[in-house]
Amino acid sequence: MRYALSTAGLARIRAFVTRNTLLAFDIDGTLAPIVERPWDARVPNGVQQGLATLAGRANVAVITGRAVEDARPMLGFMPRYLVGNHGAEGVPGLEKVSAQCARVCRAWLDELASGNELWRDIDGIVLEDKTYSLSFHFRHCRNHRAVQRLLIGRTAALLPVPTLLDGKSVLNLLPPGAPDKGEALTALLAQSGCDRALYVGDDESDEMVFRMRAPAVLSVRVEPHEASAANLYLKGQTDVARLVSELVRIIGPDDSPSPLPTRKGAAA
């Protein structure tokens, strides 16, 4: 991978991005820094302002593992598309699939709430209900590896068996057949009429996009990883603000004509 903010990396981005490019971003670890308590995460003001500018000039999408209702207040602007639950919520045309995901998650929750559950006796484990997926958070547990093994073993007994996505001290449970971020991005490209997409993410769920390796997708990973399939990388989350600023410059000002002023008393 090449550093996205190097001379060569920026040249590649400039050659790829046009006003007809879908600009898509993950939230946690990408737009917002990872924090001790996920509910305390915030998108920095400078990043919000840059994205708001982009959203006024181009097509912007946010594709996050968070639920849509959780993600929306973090943004401070309205992207054209806001997709939650790793792709299982908010993709136009996939409403029936989302409804089935919700039914599966409800059944999982009912099972996990009944009987003796060993994970409930371990301090630091939090089960988050995101309607269309579930997440076990264990950042505050003492032995992450042991807890992760316990949770993987427990979730393997659920029916239907969930698709697991590792995050940063998070184990995500997705219903079988739930759209992933790669499928969500593909659907948004078709829906938007854009001919290409730039995608920025930071973890295993974003690798679903990185592994597409499609000519119409240019991918950027936050923090380099030798096993990543991303095209470019950023050194850390703080680089995202600069990348957004560069995208604002690349897209350029909105050159659409301003509306003619109306005289007082005239019909608008």
Image (spheres, rainbow, N blue to C red):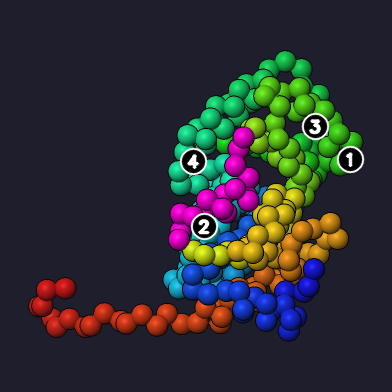
Residue 239 location (% of width, % of height): 71, 72
Query: Residues at badges 4 and 2 in contact (C-beta under 8 Å)?
Result: no
Farthest residue toward the left? 265
In the displayed structure, 238 sits above or below 110; it is below
Name the magenta segment's main secondary structure: helix
In the displayed structure, 106 sits above or below 183; it is above
- Amino acid at the residue labelled 1: Arg
State whether residue 23 appears in this view.
Answer: yes
Q: Nearer the viewer, residue 255 or 192?
A: 192
In the displayed structure, 155 sits above or below 170; it is above
Q: Nearer the viewer, residue 18 or 263?
A: 18
Give the Cα separation between the discs numbered 4 and 2: 14 Å
Residue at which label 2 appears: 189
Q: Quadrant where the N terminus lies?
A: bottom right
Q: Earlier in the sequence, mark 4 or mark 2?
A: 4
Residue 129 location (% of width, % of height): 61, 35
Left or right of residue 90, residue 114 in this image: right
| Segment colored magenta | 177-193
Number of numbered labels in the structure image: 4
Residue at which label 1 appears: 145
Residue 94: image tag: 4
Residue 232 location (% of width, % of height): 74, 69
Label 2 packing within 10 angstroms: few (<14), some (14-19), many (20+): some
SS class, disc 2: helix
Give the Cα separation between the discs numbered 2 and 3: 35 Å
